[in-house]
Image: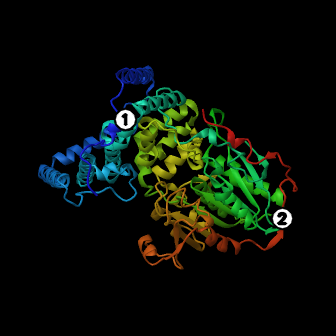
Amino acid sequence: MPRQDSPQSDSSQNGIPDPAELTATVAKIAEKSQQIVTRFLEHQGQTVSADPFNIGSAFFEMTAHMMGNPEKVFQAQASLWQGYMDLWQNTVRAMSGEEVEPVVEPESGDRRFRHEDWEENSVFDFIKQSYLLTSRWFQATVSEVEGMDEKTAQKVDFYTRHFMDAFSPSNFVLSNPEVLRATLETKGENLVQGLDNMIADLDRGEPGRLDITMTDHDAFKIGENIAVTPGKVVFQNELLQLIQYAPTTKKVKRRPLLILTPWINKFYILDLSPKNSFIKWALDQGHTLFIVSWVNPDEKLSHKSFEDYMFEGPLTALDAIEKATGEREVNAIGYCIGGTLLAATMAYMAEKKDTRIKSATFFTTLMDFSDPGELGVFIDETQLATLEEKMQSRGYLEGREMATTFNMLRANDLIWSFVVNNYLLGKDPFPFDLLHWNADSTRMPADMHSFYLRNMYLENNLVKPGGITLGGVPIDLGRIKTPTFILSTREDHIAPWKTTYTATRLLSGPVKFVLAASGHIAGVINPPQSGKYCYWTHSRNAKDPDKWLKTADQSEGSWWPEWEKWIAKHGGGQVPARIPGDGELEAIEDAPGSYVVAESD
């Protein structure tokens, strides 16, 4: 296809802008920009730390090691200049009408350069390839610096990548062809609307903090078009509401199913809508289903500990389920940190010879935190001390801070794409239930979260026999002999699958490991009718996860039916369906309950 020589070859269709109209638009942009600058400056005195992520020392160490090997630096620079020369020659040939192969191309899945002008227009193609050359050279040069410890190297690599992502030409008006087209077509109104969007996000967030809107939150209401599966809250305490769902079958498995969701987010990720609700699907398979809806804690619950979450969470829920159904034995699921809590609880129960949990399923759960992926970048003694000081001053970790950390792990998808859409193109975010849930953040009690970060991420004590004591009992994951199903996802940026795989060696009982395609959320929330992705299974758990995957069987579609075949063996037979509120526990209120609708300020 012939390349366009002009960045905006069709701009003439718009005619010459009216000078008065253009002046008015520029004036509006200047006025709104001044409002943003004023808001930012007003709150600069409220910043806590000039380097909250302890980045400076890492880059100082990297620079020192790099300068110790000037020959390697020179070689890297020479390689970059050669890349530039090749690119310039290709561009000249392309502009003369010759078909040429690109010097460098975006990685598969990189959505920043989807607009056709990035490829069809010689100028923007040059800008794109020049950026990609520089970005990859920068990251490769930094990653090859020798002498740094692993933690420092990981931090330098992570923030170097984020620095280069921030300077992508797609993030700026004059170097993004799609934004330039929109600016010409709307006579700059896209930029005016974008500044309005930015002002609204500044006003909505904490003082001086930009809280980027990712979806149309008015399009969703909990209990009306998300989290709508019928049920009742049958028990509650300070930390949780226990929801029992209405059955959809006449007969159910004898053993109820208890789901422990992560308290970092809200439980309705498993019940976004009927078409992708794991809860609704599990009910249709004949489970009596209970789920924990955690409270969104404030300063009054700052003293709640990880131990409290165990006693007032799963252990109390087991007692409540017995009263509600008359059944002592259950099957349990733990998702993410809910799975970490489930593992710790089962180790505690093993020491107490409590055998009520007859099977355990773990969704994307870390038990071994030796390699937590890029989340480990945010955990070191300096950063943790700063975070603990902040948490103790107000009693909790603000949910938006946790959400920002997770978004940074996928910055191009969860930060910069919305900067372009909302602020440069001036568009309103698209209604998306998953992003609504992602933004519906929750707080963390100070004592619990400090214990969790120190004992799991910083010291990895959960895998050490006796490394953690709960309720006066030193726990050991190796004492868990319960049949276990472990579901991990191949592109998980929160619980890397090879790290979750180590649980196959930590636990003493039979373990079925299943690996699903996609990531931490999409890989789990994948109903059979969607026909998406695939999953891998194996009859044996090899010691090496790479060997396991190499010889595993791949199946198309959702892993949910695979889990159902496994869990059905632990159902304990069938009984008549149970109606919420018919047992010893009366219904308190309709699902999804009141705890889930409490928002973070």
Looking at the picture, how far across and down is residue 329, in whole percent? 76, 65
Q: Amino acid at mark 2?
A: Ala
Mark carried by residue 577: 2
Looking at the picture, how far across and down is residue 31, in whole percent? 41, 20
Q: Which quadrant is home to the N terminus?
A: bottom left
Q: Nearer the viewer, residue 487 or 68?
A: 487
Q: Residue at x 62, y 66 (%)?
A: 529
Labels in figure, total: 2
Secondary structure, mark 2, is: loop
Say few, some or many: other residues with alpha carbon within 10 Å of mark 2 (under 14 / 14 to 19 / 20 or more): some
Q: Is residue 582 left or right of residue 451?
A: right
Q: Nearer the viewer, residue 266 or 422?
A: 422
**Residue 167, relative to residue 367: is it above or below?**
above
Residue 505 appears in the rendering:
yes
Looking at the picture, how far across and down is residue 235, in whole percent? 78, 48
Mark carried by residue 263: none
Q: Earlier in the sequence, mark 1 or mark 2?
A: 1
- Of circles 1 and 2, the one toward us is 1
Q: Is residue 151 left or right of residue 334?
A: left
Residue denoted by label 1: 14
Q: Is residue 358 left or right of residue 516?
A: right
Q: Are marks 1 and 2 in contact (CB under 8 Å)?
A: no
Q: Amino acid at mark 1?
A: Asn
Q: Residue at x 53, y 72 (%)?
A: 556
Secondary structure, mark 1, is: helix
Q: Nearer the viewer, residue 546 or 516?
A: 516
CA–CA distance between discs 1 and 2? 67 Å
Q: Residue at x 65, y 50 (%)?
A: 267
Say few, some or many: other residues with alpha carbon within 10 Å of mark 1 (under 14 / 14 to 19 / 20 or more): few
